[in-house]
Amino acid sequence: MIEAWMSADDIAEHLGVTKHTIYGWINDRSMPAHKIGRLWKFKASEVDEWVRTGGAAVVEEDED
């Protein structure tokens, strides 16, 4: 069975975060996403694996 593409809205709902967070993760943390035309599309299996391997983990910055 072929896995369907998900939109930014769909993947945000899937993960329980905002669409703004999704776009931030794409830019800052190499979230697995595919640009199709002007839209970002996602495979839930790729995103779930990225989350499982710590891709969405909060990174604490040192304060000097």
Image: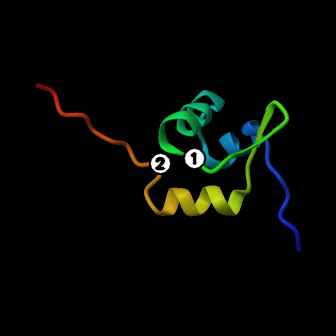
Q: Position of residue 28 (x, y in %)?
A: 48, 36
Looking at the figure, which quarter contains the C terminus?
top left
Between 30 and 60, the residue placed more toward the observer is 30
Numbered disc total? 2
Between 31 and 15, the residue placed more toward the observer is 31
* Residue contact at pointers 1 and 2, CB within 8 angstroms: yes
Residue annotated with mark 1 = 31
1 with respect to 7 (left or right): right
Q: Quadrant of residue 21?
A: top right
Of the residues shown, which amino acid type is indicated by label 1? Met
Residue lying furthest left in this view? 64
Q: Position of residue 13 (x, y in %)?
A: 69, 42
28 with respect to 35 (left or right): left
- Binning the other alpha carbons within 10 Å of mark 2 as few (below 14), some (14 to 19) or many (20 upward) gives some
Residue at 79 percent of width and 48 percent of height = 6
Q: Secondary structure at mark 1?
A: loop
Q: Quadrant of residue 36?
A: top right
Of the residues shown, which amino acid type is indicated by label 2? Ala
Q: Position of residue 26 (x, y in %)?
A: 58, 38
Q: Earlier in the sequence, mark 1 or mark 2?
A: 1
